[in-house]
Image: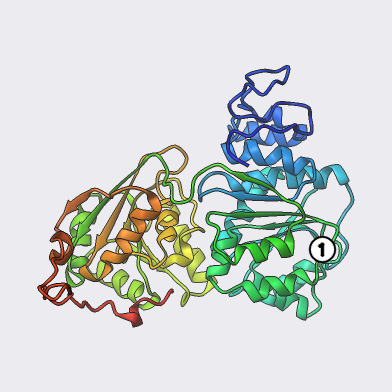
Amino acid sequence: MSATHAVAGPIGLCTSLTGGCGHPLKGCHLTDFSMLGLAPRLLSALEAQGFTDPTPIQAQAIPHILEGRDLMGLAQTGTGKTAAFGLPLIHGLMENGGKPDPKSVRALILAPTRELVNQIADNLSTFVTKTPINIACVVGGASINNQIKRLNRGADILVATPGRLLDLIDRKALTLNKTGFLVLDEADQMLDLGFIHALRQISKFLPKERQTLLFSATMPKQMNEIAQTYLDRPVRVQVSPPGKAADKVTQCVHFVEQSAKSAKLKQLLADHSDELTLVFGRTKHGCERLMKQLDAAGFSAGSIHGNKSQGQRERTLKAFRDGKIKVLVATDVAARGIDIPGVAHVYNYDLPNVAENYVHRIGRTARAGADGAAVAFCSPDEIGELRSIEKVMGISIPVASGQPPAEEQKPKRKGPSGNKGRGRRPQRGRGGKGQRMAA
């Protein structure tokens, strides 16, 4: 469904974002949460936090979810998806009443990374204040025995990574036969991280009679299989075209040799030493090495990636959120799991192999209405990645310094034989296939 499609909501209000739908409330824009039909206690919780106006994904999705429809939501990171599914989920649980049985969950939310699971649980916790709804989260890297003990009491809402969820099911610490509400958040990232088999397994444990919501920033081919497995005649809502960056993000690219990237980064960081900055690298070892170089140069830096334990990652994120660490170096494992409004700059130290991941990376800045800057470093070996990013986004990223490789600037001429002339051999940098592995 497009952003201007109008449908009848469960409370008889126009849900058009543009008005002119023929409803008696002609011209209504759903500019207030009170128009969405949520429980008064939820509205009070939102008001206490200063939230009055729903984002586009919330205004479109919530009425459908309250109707009990399955839904596929396409929206980039940072658009308010957690509240889009969390508010109607909590509303439904309160309306239905009852308590979870031991070792059972009434609603399940699956997310690809530990950071995102914790972020979702934290955000939902603010909505369930002064309600009987309880929230649990389970992730790898934390004590499974403590998680088993917690689930003995059951949970109204469980937020989990797929792998740890299956571990708990295998140990008979958890059953899903009474789960009536399922959310797959950042489904495309789950596919990127290889969770397709785990998702197939989990579907076997869920009851057929349930409501399912799938949220994704992109639509890779395998997403159709996930949608067919999990969703029943879903409504589709899309509020932002794939590849569109947040409006307040300014972007630029520096053409720089791979060996000169570290010096260039230090120079730029020194100009904004008091601001929170995210730096994205391609590999775990590369990020750790870069973090140590920055630390040795006097910058307050930390790192998160797949080789860090859950405790290390949580402590580093907290230090970054509190401003004790100013520079956080991360792999894409954190691209969709960090929600820190104060991030002023995002540096793409290494360009991502998947062009859409660039959008998710730079979505870590310009959050909550703030301005932000996204800076890309492009070595001669990464020009293909840069052009793929520009194609997906439909823009040419402004050049801040340097020049693209000479062979790209000059038009290729054909020789007398009709073959392409002998130009200079394409430059081969250090970023070979071995460095292109996803972290």
Taking the spot 82% from the left edge, 60% from the top edge, the residue there is 179
In the image, 2: left or right of 180? left
Up the image or down, 44 lies above or below 208; here it is above
142 left or right, relative to 378 = right
Quadrant location of the N terminus? Answer: top right
Q: Position of residue 98 (x, y in %)?
A: 89, 51
Q: Position of residue 275 (x, y in %)?
A: 31, 49
From the top left corner, tell me how far across and down residue 396 is, in percent: 28, 49
Question: Is 302 displayed left or right of 151 in the figure?
Answer: left
Q: Residues within 10 Å of mark 1 (few under 14, many from 20)?
A: many
Q: Helix, strand or loop at disc 1? A: loop
Q: Nearer the viewer, residue 416 or 142?
A: 416
Image quarter of residue 417? bottom left
| Residue 165 makes an appearance in the image | no
Residue type, mark 1 in image: Gly
Q: Nearer the viewer, residue 323 or 406?
A: 406
Query: How far across and down, in percent of the image, does residue 261 sit?
Result: 21, 66
Q: Is residue 381 visible?
A: yes
Numbered marks: total:
1
Q: Residue at x 48, y 56 (%)?
A: 338
Q: Residue at x 84, y 62 (%)?
A: 208
Asked whether 372 or 354 is in front, the reply is 354
Q: Residue furthest front?
A: 417
Badge 1 is on which residue? 154
Quadrant containing the C terminus is bottom left
- Colour convention of the picture: rainbow
Q: Is 190 drawn above or below residue 275 in the view shown?
A: below
Is residue 241 shown left or right of residue 25? left
